[in-house]
Amino acid sequence: MKLSDFDFDLPDHLIATRPAKPRSSARMLQAVGDEIFDRHVYDLPDMLEPGDRLILNDTRVIPARLTGQRHRKSAQGPVSAKIEVTLLEPRVGGDWTALIKPLKKLKIGEEIVFSPDLSAMLKDTADGQGLLEFNLTGEDFDAALAEAGAMPLPPYIASKRAADAQDKTDYQTVFARHPGAVAAPTASLHFDDALMEALRARGVEFTYVTLHVGAGTFLPVKVDDVTEHKMHAEWGRVSEEAAREIAETKAKGKRVIPVGTTALRLIESAARGGAIAPWEGETDIFIYPGFEFKVTDALMTNFHLPKSTLMMLVSALMGHDRIKRIYNHAVASEYRFFSYGDSSLLVPTPRG
């Protein structure tokens, strides 16, 4: 399998920079086996059956982009430098790993001031990243970060416009609970209260799991032989209750449908022993064609970047040739791509 096998031409104007309003009005490509249908997200209850179980990632995105000032005394007097920080991963004790630009303008032990309430000291550097110790922890840190930080929009949106106040709502799911992600589980951004209620009325069940999506989700694949790619690790948890609900759904012959590749990667990590089980830890599971799915019957997901690990994942689920046809149809039909774009429901095997 070569990286070029997962490439396709994507016109720049199909990259969405704002979400559909309302959320559930986004278009949805429904692929069932070899058939393709053009629908909308609000049609999802009609595409599902009573007893189907949607797996939802309830991680909460933190406003991980910070802009601050480094102050220093010089022979010419006080000088300052603008420092941009993207938080990556929390460490035990409240420290954070972070991307810092420009890292060369900051020395170990120096402070970055982000707001009157929030500052951080550079403790260490490694692999082009910094380790920051903040002046606040716990709820005080969360509150100060909410005021000073901006949402960490994906590079393909951030290159087109800066994050703004609207993104603090748009780039967060309606069921976000547990802070820790620095990227949204974007398939879930299509859900609003009205859609959730319509799905409940249809008899669709919900199970919540948590996977804190990391910035590594945007890292490019740099090897030509995709099997040599090393996935980034992300922390996740499948509770005993969640595992039991998924197992019961499978036992009844009903479908388990993750919403988003993050939820899929997490439940398949928890089922590597052959059946779903409670699980907590870091997963670096890499799903590409040839992968044997243990619990996933279908997937709701957005449209992904060319040559990305997520293209490999959907190819593993649907088959390489089918995904090529699906993406050719999506481009020709001008579906909107990536985090704020349209959605798809991928069902590899028709029912009945």
Image (cartoon, grey):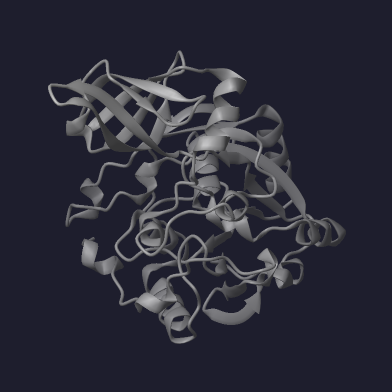
**Residue located 50% across and 78% down the image:** 335
Query: Depth check: 220 or 250 in front?
Result: 220
Q: Where is 87 relative to 327, above or below?
A: above
Task: Reply above or below: 187 against 64.
Answer: below
Residue 47 seen in the figure = no
Q: Quadrant of the N terminus?
A: bottom left
State the image quarter where residue 284 is shown: top left
Which image quadrant is residue 323 in?
bottom left
List x then y, in percent, for residue 285: 39, 41
Which quarter of the image is occupied by the C terminus?
A: bottom right
Tell me residue 146's x, y (percent): 57, 36
Q: Nearer the viewer, residue 62 or 30?
A: 62
Residue 169 falls left or right of residue 112: right
Residue in the image at 40% along x and 34% along y: 87
Residue at the far top in the pictured view: 93
> Horizontally, is 217 left or right of 242 in the view?
left
Left or right: residue 40 versus residue 195 is: left
Q: Residue furthest left?
A: 75
Residue 103 x, y percent position in the rendering: 22, 33
